[in-house]
Image (cartoon, rainbow, N blue to C red):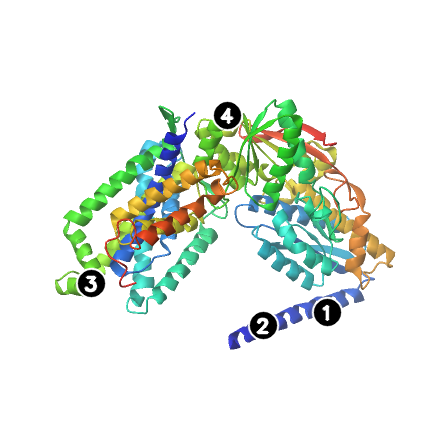
Amino acid sequence: MRQRSLITITAALAAGALTLTACGSRDDDGGSDSGSGGTKVVIGVDAPLTGDLSALGLGIKNSVDLAAKTANKQKLVDGVTFEIKALDDQAQPSSGQANASTLVADKSVYGVVGPLNSSVAESMQKVFDDAKLVEISPANTGPALTQGVDWQTKKVRTYKSYFRTATTDAIQGPFAAQYVYNDAKKKNVFVIDDKKTYGAGLAATFTEEFKKLGGKVVGTDHIDPDTKDFSAVATKVKNSGADVVYYGGEYPQAGPLSKQIKAAGAKIPLVGGDGIYDPTFVELAGANSAGDLATSVGAPVETLDSAKQFVADYKAAGYKEEYAAYGGYSYDAAWAIILAVKKVVEDNDGKLPSDARAKITAATQNVSFDGVTGKVSFDEYGDATNKQLTVYAVENGAWKAVKSGTYTG
Amino acid sequence: MNELPQQLVNGLLLGAMYGLVAIGYTMVYGIVQLINFAHGEIFMIGGFGALTVYLYVLPDGTTMWVALPLMLVGAVIAAVLVAVGAERFAYRPLRTAPRLAPLITAIGLSLALQQAVWAWYPGAKESINFPEIPGGPFEIGSVTIQTGDIFLFIAAPVSMAILAYFVMKTRTGRGMQATAQDPDTAKLMGINTDRIIVVAFALGALFAAVGAVAYGLKYGQVQFRMGFILGLKAFTAAVLGGIGNIYGAMLGGLVLGLAETMATAYIADVPGFDLLGGQSWANVWAFVLLILVLLVRPQGLLGERVADRA
């Protein structure tokens, strides 16, 4: 008990000291505002930087870093220097919430990009909303995050401070279903998910649209993401007579799953969402993954004119990791925050107002610009207005874009 | 199409792997009454040992027929070294301490080993691809067997036979039996019990290493967390078979593997159980089976004595 209170006091002291230092440095900077120095605005990043999903998380972190550096180089906001503060959530909701509290406590943080996982976002939204700190996710696709749990019947925005640059499963699942049924001409699907917010949601929206189109669901299963042995499921898939498998989940499981389904003798494609659209999937799934499909939000970053600059800058900056599936969306998310900061600072005679966090959140709602992934703006729920999606297929050991389009319902 | 034969093979393969790892739990428990929770990590280290040989020792492009035996040696060396080191520096100083102390040490060691591999093995922050044996799957009737599984099919029974011979026929093996029955008397009879305990840890690590190579070949990847869940399952298998009994460990593994596979394949087809089937419920059914077995036979399937000293 004694030790515990000691820890509490130490933590409180440390937090206090940090806050004080932050305030102190801002005051110092405030004094030199007229000069070339300026205010420090920190953009927080929350993503899995270690563990199975780190390939995606590090791409997010680097892309936000690139946005901050670009803004600094262009002197986009007079008197403001952008920095990032990246925290690792290990794809765990509990870590995400702890990180959210850490970012809120840091008074120099005026916006956050992240997280990757919808389940992590659920645990962070309220913390940020209470602090009126804007949060833009480049990757969350769970519809309930913006439109409330009853999004299918009654859309209600739950948190005013939450935005995303990614499209939702409500669009992605049906888009995949249409491609699989109309273009790939597959009529019998075996649906598997990992029971997580993202995977189960995606599988549900896919199934609904696939049935509506006239396809048949010949089997369903839910896997345990902690294991790697899917041989029993693979045998079921083989004997179900399915000509395609839809998997709602992420690549650490999807790769081995695809491999084991093919190994069991079912030479049918596995289709997934943006969670499996990563080079690691192809590595894990092995040579037989040729023909597997994934949908991902937006048009392929490499093909957009607006993205060429981003791709070139990213290469020039020399990051060790790829920008991965969400690099462009992360850059756009960070840029939206930067533009919101710019607006707030310019409206307040070149200084950050005392209620800067709330003002920046409000300004984000009205941000509109041509970003890496196309036009970036947010609708009344905080969702991206850009509803473009792309189908990718594995060819010669890499993802190749097959078809881009917009889901219209 | 009848999928039962295929599912039986799936279950036996999974079970054989559980069994290989379970031997380590059961032998150490039989001799020092310690549940070595770090054993799952010994298994994981074996996998990384094999990978290290393939990636950093052998020249690129070595055929698997040459590489596999050497990888096996690497796996065994890595796993045995860590297991013996753990026994010497973590468990031996606590041999006379209350039973909970070494147990907690084991949990701590398990976490430490996991994080050490995570932090220092190059690329281990994500799954690392494990080399595969080339060649297509084999079809026997309606059953498909993967090339990678053939290793497990051969290695598991062979390992078991060698272990049985060792424990029953050799001097050291009989020393192990004696130490398990009564360490003090065994010591009076001139058995070096310290050495016997080291041998038990080393043997357990050896079989875990074989299991780890089989895991890598079967799933095509290793990762720093691979020993955690598998270790828990193997421990369950050891309890199911009767902890302390080496044949029980193998049998428990096979029963557990079959139970999980059958649950995945068939429970959902039982009327009214459609929501309780599928792979995510397989563990639940496996543990239901464990509880049922322990209700009828508290000592496990092949356990001879009640765990009187636990």
Q: Amino acid at mark 4?
A: Gly
Q: Amino acid at mark 2?
A: Thr
Q: Amino acid at mark 3?
A: Pro
Could you tell me which secondary element the residue under label 3 belongs to?
A: helix
* Real-space CA distance between mark 2 and mark 1, rounded to the nearest whole angstrom: 24 Å
Is A23 drawn above or below residue A186 in the view shown? below
**Marks 3, 4: nearer the viewer:** 4
- Please tell me if label 2 and label 3 are on a single chain: no
Q: Are marks 2 and 1 in contact (CB under 8 Å)?
A: no
- Residue at mark 2: chain: A
In-front residue for pair B226/A21: B226
Q: Are marks 4 and 2 in contact (CB under 8 Å)?
A: no
Q: Which mark is residue A241?
A: 4
The mark that comes first in sequence, 1 or 4, is 1
* Real-space CA distance between mark 1 and mark 4, rounded to the nearest whole angstrom: 67 Å
Residue B109 can be seen, yes or no? yes
**Marks 4, 2: nearer the viewer:** 4
